[in-house]
Amino acid sequence: MSRVAEKINEFKINYFNLNHNLIITFARVFTNCATSVAYYRIFHSLFDLILQLTGSSPQFKHIHGNEWGCIIADLDYAQAKELGMILNEIDKGL
């Protein structure tokens, strides 16, 4: 979570290009609910949207052997738990 304004939380998905020293923001999610169920829905919706827009699901290096090499985050417990649940589902779905 990068910013909190009153009771609205902002969650961003960024990409860092080392060659150009550039950060690109792919998605921003604003939510006023910080429960495990809410974050599960956020991650699930985000990965579904990536599939719809690109025609392919997100790929993770530790699961698929390529693409996203790491996830660096300041996740709270609910965010970390649900991201782990989604990654576990992706891993089991292979």
Image (spheres, helix red, strand yellow):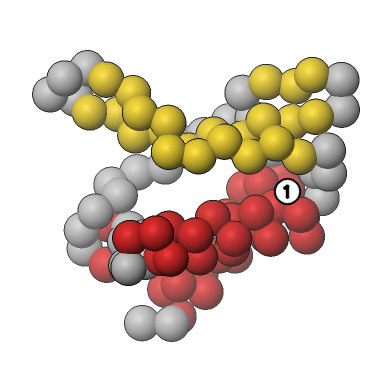
Q: Quadrant of residue 92?
A: bottom left
* Residue 85 x %, y %: 59, 65
Q: Quadrant of residue 17?
A: top left
Residue 56, relative to residue 25: is it above or below? below
* Residue 15 x %, y %: 34, 34
Residue 68, relative to residue 30: is it above or below? below
Name the residue that disc number 1 marks.
78
Q: Is residue 46 left or right of residue 35?
A: left
Write the residue at 59% across / 56% down. Answer: 43
Write the residue at 43% across / 65% down. Answer: 52
Q: Quadrant of residue 65?
A: bottom left
Write the residue at 66% across / 46% down. Answer: 79
- Residue farthest front in this picture: 53
* Residue 42 x %, y %: 65, 54
Residue 6 visible in the snapshot: yes
Q: Amino acid at mark 1?
A: Ala
Residue 90, relative to residue 42: is it above or below? below
Element carrying mark 1: helix
Counting every numbered tag in the picture gives 1
